[in-house]
Amino acid sequence: MALKTKNPPPVPEQSQVLAEERILRVNPEIDRRLDGFMQANTKLTDYYTTLVKQHPERAVRAFMLTKMFRHEADMRQTARQAPQAKEWLDQQEPSLKQRILERLEKINPFYREKALVREIAREKTRIDFTPKPSLGQGMSV
């Protein structure tokens, strides 16, 4: 049985093209919903249009501010869940711990705590919902 070789990493020019494709790609359903939202909120649409045209650096900060608030909310939730998740992980076998930690090696350290809680939850779900071997067929009444 032959092993498949991994594809070489994309050339930087290709990755730039892919990034541009993601930005330029439009989902018609979401675009239609966004158009309706923008028409219903003309003041907000005018505000952001003016902000982007006249103060582009401020527009970037405004957009990043919403991302920051979302990240902070995620981190507050992670901080509440982390102690229980780590306690559960400490009770598991070393191979499971190693498997989870290997997945986290590639994650940006800024997001690692959130990723750790997510991976622990994923493994716990996988363990909880695996079919248990039955000893025999039960009788119906």
Image (tube, grey):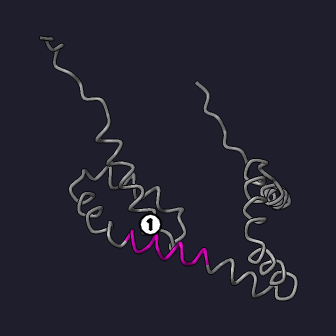
Q: Is residue 41 above or below residue 141?
A: below
Does residue 71 appear left or right of residue 77 in this picture?
Answer: right
Name the amino acid, label 1. Answer: Lys
Does residue 137 appear left or right of residue 12 in this picture?
Answer: left
What's the residue at 74%, 47% (across, down)?
29
- Give how far across and how far down residue 78 sits, in percent: 39, 69
Whether the magenta-drawn stretch holds residue 72 is answered as yes
- Give how far across and how far down residue 108 sits, in percent: 54, 69
- Give how far across and how far down residue 11 sits, in percent: 81, 57
- Is label 1 in a helix, a strand or a loop? helix
Q: Nearer the viewer, residue 29 or 56?
A: 29
Q: Is residue 126 above or below residue 12?
A: above
Instruction: State the extent of the magenta-drawn residues as a range.
Output: 66-78
Quadrant of residue 46 within the rendered picture: bottom right
**Tag 1: Cα neighbours inside 10 Å, few (<14), some, or many (≥20)?**
some
Residue lying farthest to the front in this orientation: 40
- Give how far across and how far down residue 140 sits, in percent: 15, 11
Whether the magenta-drawn stretch holds residue 130 is answered as no
Q: Which residue is mark 1?
A: 114
Type of secondary structure dominating the magenta stretch: helix
Quarter that holds the C terminus: top left
Q: Nearer the viewer, residue 83 or 4?
A: 83
Quadrant of residue 33 within the rendered picture: bottom right
* Count of all numbered marks drawn on residues in the image: 1
Q: Nearer the viewer, residue 21 or 6?
A: 21
Q: Is residue 86 above or below residue 120?
A: below
What's the residue at 67%, 43% (across, down)?
6
Quarter that holds the N terminus: top right
What's the residue at 83%, 77% (across, down)?
49
What's the residue at 36%, 73% (across, down)?
79
